[in-house]
Image: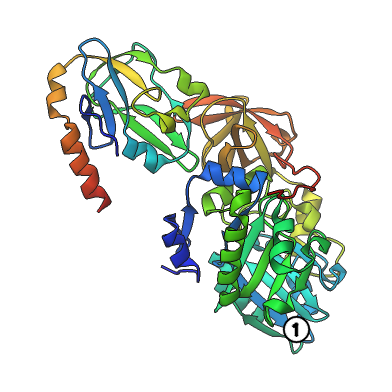
């Protein structure tokens, strides 16, 4: 399973690319495999403030809807509008074209509480066993 | 949890499993969308052995069923099948079933898994004459092979003229054993067949269909795609789109009711409802854009709630969100504009005639 080392991870299977202006957020390979058939993504409005650990977006598979939690607090500065017409990008390229939104962090130190790729790999290994 | 005879096969194929009314069943093998598309484009095979098989044989079988179901059983000829329902005295739906007439006084009734014990007890409690009413599900399985190339594939495998069967025909296949039947029925809206067979036959058929069909794209199909397929075809799901609180008229299945039959259980209530008129009815609807409607979501018109969703999904064939729900009668005609409330936001929906999708003329075959 691909877990890029430049990203940080949450227990709820989001990833974030640390950046002081535009920290991109998406879901991990593990999450998109669990969802399997992504058919709809609901994104936050640009300008919305989000809080670490609170729902910021919704992703829907054929079977059910799931919340996507903000990995850190801040303001949404960009959203991936391509997901409106092509939600399957989340399955096809979850670390690239399937990103969800970008946050300008308000509490950059919150990043320290997130998992590294090694820690996240360990978490998913323990969940599947 | 209960397991079908093919449970180990589903595990071996690495299926994602789900608890369906106490049965450990495959939800999908690879992807709901891919499996759905396989059935529409070529064919797929479903293990639906969780459904119950009851047999009524002997004098009184016809009379017993005719008193219990809303359709005219006498008009169902030998070798024919009929989609129908059991009602309670109040006209509420106890189950929807397909009855297959195997002989003059010999019927196979396929019942929903959650109602297996209650349906059999219900029939036994209303027995007429010397008919023997048995749950024959033990040691037996049901396989559905559905999709435009199902007929050709099965003819090749079985050396049996399944193409000669019309829709809702049923016939015994003696080469598969003494209690093996095939019917041209299904729950997908595509052409297809259902096999009611002993476990050992099901294992053989499962392997043969997957081996011989592999080059044509035939794959196993889980309950996830079974749900999207049946929804596109406008087929109701018992326990979700109808139950004891809804009548056949409310479920918009009035065509199944033989209201002129001298008597049947629940008739008085249905006649009364017919005279009184309906206050609500099941409709199909679609969203031009927006999230997926789910069970329980509210439907609005003129600023107030006028109904609720019973089933909803993303339609892979139509590439849009579709659903079914009960609405107040004035809002039931096709083209009526409603709103649906999803996570605090409203989105426009349009009432449409069901089915959402219909198969074209069936002439496809596997050419590989």
- Circle 1 residue: B128
Colour setup of the view = rainbow
Quadrant assignment, res A3:
top left
Q: Is residue B225 above or below residue B339?
A: below
Residue B250 seen by the camera: no
Coordinates of residue A86 in the picture (x, y in percent): 50, 25
Farthest bottom residue in view: B130
Q: Secondary structure at mark 1?
A: loop
Q: Is residue B355 above or below residue A45?
A: below
Quadrant assignment, res B183:
bottom right
Coordinates of residue A23 in the picture (x, y in percent): 26, 17
Marked residue chain, label 1? B
Q: Count all numbered tags in the image, as a single digit.
A: 1
Residue B120 seen by the camera: yes
Farthest front residue in view: B368
Coordinates of residue B164 in the picture (x, y in percent): 83, 63
Q: Nearer the viewer, residue B334 or A39?
A: A39
Residue at image position (79%, 48%) is: B362
Residue at image position (31%, 33%) is: A28
Disc 1 packing (10 Å; few <14; some 14–19; many ≥20) = some
Which quadrant holds the N terminus of chain B? Answer: bottom left
The answer to whether residue A37 is left or right of residue B318 is left
Q: Is residue A100 above or below residue B92?
A: above
Coordinates of residue B314 in the picture (x, y in percent): 56, 37
Residue at image position (37%, 29%) is: A94
């Amino acid at each position: 399973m691909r877990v890029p080392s430049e990203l940080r991870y949450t227990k709820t299977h989001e990833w974030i690319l640390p950046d002081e202006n535009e920290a991109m957020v998406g879901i991990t390979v593990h999450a998109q495999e669990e969802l399997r058939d992504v058919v709809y993504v609901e994104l936050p409005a640009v300008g919305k403030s989000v809080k670490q650990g609170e729902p910021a977006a919704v992703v829907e598979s054929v079977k059910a809807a799931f919340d996507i939690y903000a990995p850190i607090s801040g303001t949404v500065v960009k959203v991936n509008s391509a997901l409106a017409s092509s939600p399957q990008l989340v399955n096809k390229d979850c670390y690239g074209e399937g990103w969800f939104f970008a946050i300008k962090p308000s509490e950059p130190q919150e990043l320290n509480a997130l998992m590294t790729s090694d820690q996240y790999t360990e978490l998913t290994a323990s969940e599947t066993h | 949890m209960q397991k079908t005879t093919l449970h180990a096969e589903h595990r071996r194929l690495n299926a994602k499993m789900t608890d369906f009314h106490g049965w450990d069943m495959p939800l999908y093998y690879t992807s709901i969308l891919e499996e759905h598309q396989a059935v529409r484009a070529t064919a797929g095979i479903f293990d639906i052995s969780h459904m119950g098989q009851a047999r009524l044989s002997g004098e009184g079988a016809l009379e017993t069923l005719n008193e219990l179901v809303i359709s005219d059983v006498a008009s169902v000829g030998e070798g024919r099948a009929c989609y129908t329902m059991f009602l309670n005295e109040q006209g509420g739906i106890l189950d929807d079933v397909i009855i297959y007439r195997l002989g003059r006084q010999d019927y196979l009734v396929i019942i929903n898994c959650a109602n297996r014990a209650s349906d059999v007890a219900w029939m036994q409690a209303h027995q007429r004459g010397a008919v023997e009413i048995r749950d024959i599900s033990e040691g037996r399985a049901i396989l559905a092979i559905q999709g435009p190339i199902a007929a050709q594939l099965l003819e090749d495998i079985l050396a049996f003229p399944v193409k000669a069967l019309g829709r809702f025909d049923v016939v015994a296949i003696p080469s598969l054993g003494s209690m093996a039947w095939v019917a041209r029925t299904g729950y997908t809206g595509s052409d297809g067949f259902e096999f009611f067979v002993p476990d050992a036959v099901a294992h053989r058929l499962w392997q043969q269909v997957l081996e011989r069909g592999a080059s044509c794209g035939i794959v196993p199909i889980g309950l996830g795609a079974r749900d999207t397929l049946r929804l596109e075809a406008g087929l109701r799901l018992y326990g979700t789109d109808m139950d004891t609180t809804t009548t056949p008229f409310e479920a918009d299945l009035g065509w199944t009711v033989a209201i002129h039959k001298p008597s049947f259980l629940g008739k008085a209530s249905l006649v009364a409802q017919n005279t009184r008129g309906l206050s609500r009815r099941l409709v199909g609807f679609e969203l031009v854009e927006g999230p997926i409607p789910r069970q329980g979501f509210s439907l609005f018109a003129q600023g107030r709630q006028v109904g609720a969703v019973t089933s909803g999904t993303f339609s892979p064939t139509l590439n849009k969100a579709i659903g079914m729900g009960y609405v107040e009668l004035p809002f039931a005609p096709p083209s009526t504009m409603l709103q649906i409330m999803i996570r605090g936001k409203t989105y426009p929906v349009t009432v449409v005639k069901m089915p959402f999708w219909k198969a074209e003329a069936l002439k496809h075959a596997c050419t590989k």
